Image (tube, rainbow, N blue to C red):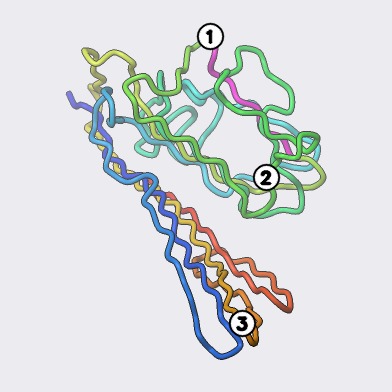
């Protein structure tokens, strides 16, 4: 007899340094920084707890196709340990989702969520589509986090399905979920065949650096330029004659 458990950590930080450089070399800067999400989720089904984790990595969906995912028991999905099982080979069953992250890692197409609603769809999953201008491109992600005692609800047979689509080309995406097998704190889950435990870490870091300031006097004025810089695993940058900006964001989850 054994009891399954999970220890999870979800992180989201933001940091931006705004700089303004004058022609004479003087620099003014302001740091903007905050930890948006930080903390461990102990194993359990109460607030700030979770006891299940599931991840599907580098999954390919061909252009023009959709697929429906059962967020309750993940029926017909094998992530390497059997249909409907978690990474330990034990059956999945989620009644609440605490953390949801989907990321398009590559592909020329756009990742759509709920392009149309399947039967018994999970009502809290947002609609991301090309027509709405919200579909994900390569490198884009959606992160939802609700650690309250009442997290995102899953009801088997009535509100548990999610549809993913590939629009305009093939896509490759990752899907990460941290949740609770039961929405009642008095319940517990056990397996009589094997012992199990799991741990997961989810981190998402976004940093952006920009700048701005001015300097003037009664007899003359100095022109200003704005610049910003940041670094992380995913980087994009743009520049103009008066202002340069580079920003980056990274999100990685290990389960």
Task: Answer whether labels 2 and 1 touch (C-beta < 8 Å).
Answer: no
Magenta region's main secondary structure? strand
Q: Quadrant of the C terminus?
A: top left
Q: Is residue 227 magenta?
A: no
Q: Nearer the viewer, mark 1 or mark 3?
A: 3
Q: Nearer the viewer, mark 2 or mark 3?
A: 3
Return the x and y of residue 25 as percentages of the image width and height: 53, 89
Indicate whether 109 appears above or below 23: above
Q: Which residues are magenta?
A: 157-166
Report which residue position mark 3 lands on: 218
Badge 2 or badge 3: first in the primary sequence: 2
Judging depth in this view, the residue of 20 and 124 nearest the camera is 20
Judging depth in this view, the residue of 170 and 227 nearest the camera is 227
The alpha-carbon separation of the residues under discs 2 and 3 comes to 51 Å
The alpha-carbon separation of the residues under discs 1 and 3 comes to 74 Å
Report which residue position mark 2 lands on: 136
Return the x and y of residue 51 as percentages of the image width and height: 30, 30
Q: Could you tell whether 139 is left or right of 204 in the image?
A: right
Which residue is at a point 35% across and 21% down the rendered structure image?
Answer: 181
Which residue is at a point 75% across and 42% down the rendered structure image?
Answer: 62
Q: Residue furthest bottom?
A: 24
Report which residue position mark 1 lands on: 157
Badge 1 or badge 3: first in the primary sequence: 1
Return the x and y of residue 164 as percentages of the image width and height: 66, 33
Q: Residue furthest left?
A: 1
Kind of element beneath mark 3: loop
Return the x and y of residue 118 as percentages of the image width and height: 68, 18
């Amino acid at each position: 007899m054994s009891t399954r458990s999970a220890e999870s950590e979800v992180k989201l930080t933001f940091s931006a340094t705004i700089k303004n450089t004058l022609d004479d070399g003087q620099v003014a800067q302001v740091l903007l920084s905050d930890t948006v999400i930080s903390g461990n989720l102990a194993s359990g089904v109460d607030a700030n707890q979770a006891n299940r984790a599931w991840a599907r990595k580098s999954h390919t969906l061909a252009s023009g196709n959709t697929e429906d995912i059962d967020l309750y028991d993940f029926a017909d999905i094998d992530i390497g340990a059997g249909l409907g099982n978690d990474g330990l080979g034990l059956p999945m069953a989620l009644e609440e989702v605490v953390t949801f992250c989907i990321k398009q890692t590559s592909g020329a197409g756009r990742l759509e969520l709920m392009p149309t609603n399947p039967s018994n769809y999970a009502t809290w999953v947002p609609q991301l589509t090309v027509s709405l201008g919200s579909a994900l491109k390569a490198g884009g992600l959606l992160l939802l986090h609700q650690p309250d005692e009442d997290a995102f609800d899953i009801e088997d047979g009535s509100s548990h399905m999610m549809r993913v689509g590939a629009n305009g080309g093939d896509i490759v995406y990752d899907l990460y979920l941290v949740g609770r097998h039961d929405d009642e704190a008095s319940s517990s889950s056990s397996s009589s065949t094997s012992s199990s435990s799991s741990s997961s870490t989810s981190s998402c870091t976004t940093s952006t650096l920009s700048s701005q300031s001015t300097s003037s006097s009664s007899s003359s004025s100095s022109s200003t330029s704005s610049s910003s810089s940041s670094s992380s695993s995913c980087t994009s940058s743009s520049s103009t004659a008066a202002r340069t900006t580079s920003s980056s964001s990274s999100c990685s989850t290990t389960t």
